[in-house]
Amino acid sequence: MNDHKVIYLIPDDNGGAMWCEDPAPEPGMEEYDAIKYIKYEEIAARDRLINNVVDVLDELRLPHSTCDDCWYSCPKSEDGCCNDDVGAECNCGADEHNSIIDKLIKQARELVK
Ligand SMILES: [Zn+2]
């Protein structure tokens, strides 16, 4: 058993492949020709980190703003807005902010599939 966290399978001179710690150890070799193997415990650690990042991102969601004077509240706030002329769309920035959070969470979850 070795203590490599990452090792590469690279093409050798005979049309086969060999294990190497460097994806392109010699001039003229392309790292894109290597296959990267990552030790399972490293992947599991990355998955835990990504899941923690997702939890933190989830906590960064913003509620729609509610003002004491409901005239200025976001139409999507729990109590709504008293000004019917503003429509029903978010005007406090929470939807835009939360959509960015949603995109980041979606991208992060793709990494742990
Ligand atoms: Zn809003």
Image (cartoon, rainbow, N blue to C red):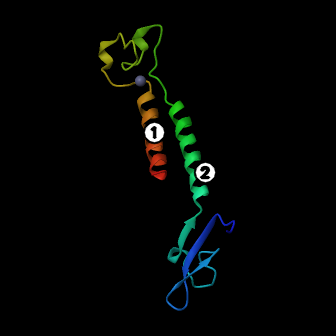
Q: Is residue 66 visible?
A: yes
Query: Which of the two discs, 2 and 1, labels the residue nearer the N terminus?
Result: 2
In the image, farthest residue toward the right:
3
Q: Position of residue 21 (x, y in %)?
A: 65, 74
Local packing at callout 2 (Cα closer than 10 Å; few below 14, some 14-19, many 20+) is: few
| Vertical placement of residue 86 versus 31, above or below | above
Q: Secondary structure at mark 1?
A: helix
| Vertical placement of residue 28 versus 93, above or below | below
Confirm or reject: label 2 Cβ below 8 Å from ligand 1. no
Q: Which residue is mark 2?
A: 45
Which residue is located at x 57 percent, y 46 percent? 48
In the image, farthest residue toward the bottom:
14
Local packing at callout 1 (Cα closer than 10 Å; few below 14, some 14-19, many 20+) is: some
Which image quadrant shows ligand 1? top left
Q: Amino acid at mark 1?
A: Ile
Q: Secondary structure at mark 2?
A: helix
Q: Is residue 60 visible?
A: no
Q: Which residue is mark 1?
A: 100
Real-space Cα distance between discs 2 and 1?
Answer: 25 Å
> Dots 2 and 1: beta carbons under 8 Å?
no
Q: Quadrant of residue 18?
A: bottom right
For residue 39, side relative to residue 61 (left or right): right
Which residue is nearer to you in this view: 73 or 9? Answer: 9
| Vertical placement of residue 49 versus 96, above or below | below
Task: Quarter of the image for the N terminus: give it.
Answer: bottom right
Q: Amino acid at mark 2?
A: Ala
